Amino acid sequence: MSNLISLILLAYVIQVVESLMELKPRTITVLRGDSARLTCSTTEQWEVMVWLLNGSAVLTISFQFGMLSNNPNMTAVNCSTNQLSSWEFFLISAQRSHQGQVTCDLQNIHRETANLFIQERGNVAITGGNQTAMRGEEVLFQCLAVGWYPAPSLTWLVNGREVDQGQYSISTEQPFDVDGFYNLHSNLSIQAAVSCHVECLATVSALPTPQASSVRLTVVAEVENVCNNSIALIAGTASLSAILLLMLLSVCIALCYKQRRKAKSSKHMTRRIDESERERSSVAEATQGKVNLGYTTEGYSGPEWGDLIVTSGAHCQTGSISAHKRQGSGATGGNSKTSGRPDASKKSQEVPAEDFDIDMDAPETEKAAVAIQSQFRKFQTKKKTDSKS
C-alpha cells in the first residue's frame, strides 16, 4: 500500500515538473541548407541551460550572463517575459549529419528532447521531350527523380488532372550508405486522344512546392485538320487570284489588239491618201498644171494603158496630147478564145498613135476635165473597196 502511494506521488511530481518546462516543436523537418529553430521555455528558476545535438553539447547559456560559448553554426536568442523564461535555439545551415535528437537541458531541474529530420531536394525530368502520335496510339512517358532524400512521392498530371496510380509504375533505387540518395523511375502509358500537357511531380514533406517537369503530346490528326483547312483556304485564294489575273490579262490583250488595229487602219488610210496625192501631183506635172484630157484610169491593167505623151511647140497655141494604146495578149477585153484555131488577135499589129489637137482654154475642155476627175475618184473608191475585201 505504501509503495503504491509512493508511485502515485512520483508521477505527480514528474507531471508538475514537465508542466513547468516546454520544448517545441517536438518534431522538426527542414531541407538541407535551411535553418532549424527550437524554443525552450520554463517558469522555474534556473542557472544553466545546455543545448545538446545527438548527445553532444553544442551551446551553453547562463541565466545571469547569457551565452557562454560561441559556435558559428549555432546561436540562441533570449525571448523571455516577466512570467516566462524562454530561449530560441537556431541551427544555421542544417546538414544531413545534424539529423537526430536536439535536447534542452536545465541542469538540476529537467530536460526535454525533440527530433530533427534533414531532407534533400533532388531533380526531376521527363525523358524524351515532346512527343507526336497518331490518334488512338499508345504513348509511353518516362520520368526520372534523382538525388532525393528520403524517397520522394511521385505523381503524374495530364492537363492539370492527377493520373490514377494504377496507370503508372514506380521503381525505387535505395542509397548505398547513410549519406546516399534515392533515385526513382516511373513509366506512364496513355492513349493519344487529344493534344495535352503531361507533367511529372516529385516532392518531400519539407519542400513548399513540388519539383515538376512537363512535356507536350501532339496528336497528328489535329495537326492534319488544321493543315487541311489552311491548304483549302490558300487554294481558294490562289484560284480566285488566278481568275482575276486572267480576266485582267484578257482585257489588256483586247485593248492592245483594238489599239493596234486602229493604228494600223490609220496608217493604211494615211498611205492611201499619200498615194492619191502623189498620183495627182504626177498628173499635174504631166499637164504642166492643166488637166490632161487624155488620161483615164478605167480599164487600167498595166503599162499598156495610161502612157501619156505631152508635146508642146512654139508654133501652136494649144497643147498637143498624143495617146496611144499598145495591144498584147489579153488586151482585147478578155475575150480571147481557147479553141484550137489560131486567134487572129494574136497576130495583130501595133496600131499607130493618133494625134489630137485640143484647145485647153475652151469651155468644153474644162467640162471634160471635170468628168475625167470624177471618173478618177470613182476608180480610187473602187480600188479601196477591192483592197479591203
Image (tube, helix red, strand yellow):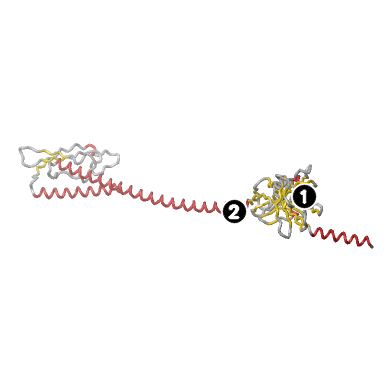
- Residue ID for mark 2: 225
Q: Which of 368 and 50 is in front in this view?
A: 50
- What amino acid does circle 2 point to? Asn
- What is the secondary structure assignment of the residue under circle 2? helix
- The image's mark for residue 50 is 1
Where is residue 111 shown, x and y percent of the image?
Answer: 80, 53
Quadrant housing residue 319: top left
Which amino acid type is marked by label 1? Answer: Val
Residue 1, given in percent of the width and then of the height, sits at 94, 63
Going 78% across and 44% down the picture, which residue do you hit? Answer: 178
Can residue 232 be seen here? yes
- Residue 138: x and y in percent read 70, 51
Q: Nearer the viewer, residue 221 or 376?
A: 221
Q: Which residue is drawn at 9% across and 38% down?
A: 312
Q: Where is residue 241 in the image (x, y as percent from the top left)?
A: 46, 52
Q: Which residue is drawn at 80% across and 47% down?
A: 55
343 or 130, which is in the foreground?
Answer: 130
* Closer to the eye: label 2 or 1: 1
